[in-house]
Image: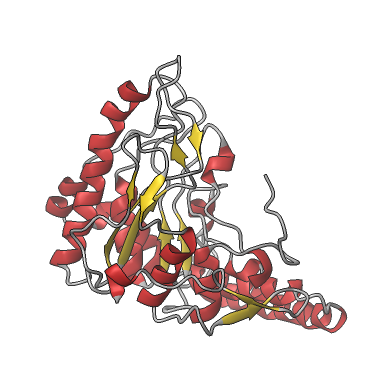
Amino acid sequence: RPFLNQPPGGWPSFGSVVSKLQGYKDPAVPSFVGLAPKMGEMRWANSGDPGYVGVAHAPFQPNKGGAAEDMSLNGITLERLRDRRALLDSFDQFRREVDSSGIMAGLDTFNQQAFNVLTSSKLLEALDVSREDPKVAALYGKGDPKNRDDGGPKMMEHFLAARRLVEAGARCVTVAFSRWDHHGKNFDALREDLPLLDRGLTALLTDLRQRGLEQDVSVIVWGEFGRTPTINAAGGRDHWPRVSCALLAGGGMRHGQVIGSTDRLGGEPETRPVKFGEVFATLYQNLGIDVSTTVINDLSGRPQYLVTPGCEAIPELVG
């Protein structure tokens, strides 16, 4: 369902904003990587849209459309690749002279990124979890690549790949794990999935701490809405936008606390309701981005704040 009152170009996702504002830490590694695997319903595999910040800041998705296979030269020498790049540059120069829409500039950035990726093994090595210390990999465990209904597989290896990508230079990595839209047989599904999610998160957070990264890397687990506080006739829970939950860790935040509460049924916020914008503001602040002053111009040239004005970082975590 489209969002109302979107600016020209549409709202950008968090990772795309970070890519736009902070750029590449390493030119051979995309700033924003989406690890969503192929799913029974590919809409659930959307790692985020770039919106008005432009296609150059869309997520790089190595598990989509054979992208991993495309990240190899297939026998082409670097010298030949450079010759092809010179020819491409000549065409790009012509197109830049006739294209004032801004789309070509984004594609040019993509071409530059592709060249950097192809001439460096850094990204492929980060994605290759078989290079990891077997003792560390064992903490994460093995996943289940099968899809269930319209959801996604349970790829434990993606938690490990996310850590490797961050170490390699990615600024934002998203992971899509299993399926959570349980309108029926909710308890059977959660008894299967929750222990795996717990293991993946525990391994990731432990791994980050042991590597001295827990102050620098923020981790968040959440969805776009909650589930009904009552069980339906099929033994499931339906969509519930009035209250939901999120787990935040790392990032130098103050942990070990629950912020806010619901009524006794878990259906309505009761004390200290937290808005989505506050969570985003917290993540931006952890990255050194001030949401009270930072704006990005949309495609009409109008400056847009990163979150709804008035939303600030959660003081209980970062104040």
Q: Is residue 184 left or right of residue 154?
A: right
Q: Is residue 207 left or right of residue 175?
A: left
Whole-percent x, y for residue 170 in the image: 40, 69
Quadrant the N terminus occupies? top right
- Residue depicted at x 42% and y 42%: 268
Pick the residue in front: 65 or 12.
12
- Residue depicted at x 47% and y 33%: 151
- Residue depicted at x 71% and y 61%: 6
Asked where in the image residue 218 lies, by quadrant, the reply is: bottom left
Whole-percent x, y for residue 112 in the image: 59, 76
Q: Is residue 13 left or right of residue 132?
A: right
Q: Is residue 169 above or below residue 165?
A: below
Q: Is residue 57 left or right of residue 100?
A: left
Asked where in the image residue 195 lies, by quadrant, the reply is: top left
Pick the residue in front: 268 or 83.
268
Pick the residue in front: 201 or 252.
252
Quadrant the C terminus occupies? bottom left
Q: Is residue 280 above or below residue 139?
A: below
Whole-percent x, y for residue 289 in the image: 45, 80
Query: Which residue lies most toward the top here?
Result: 233
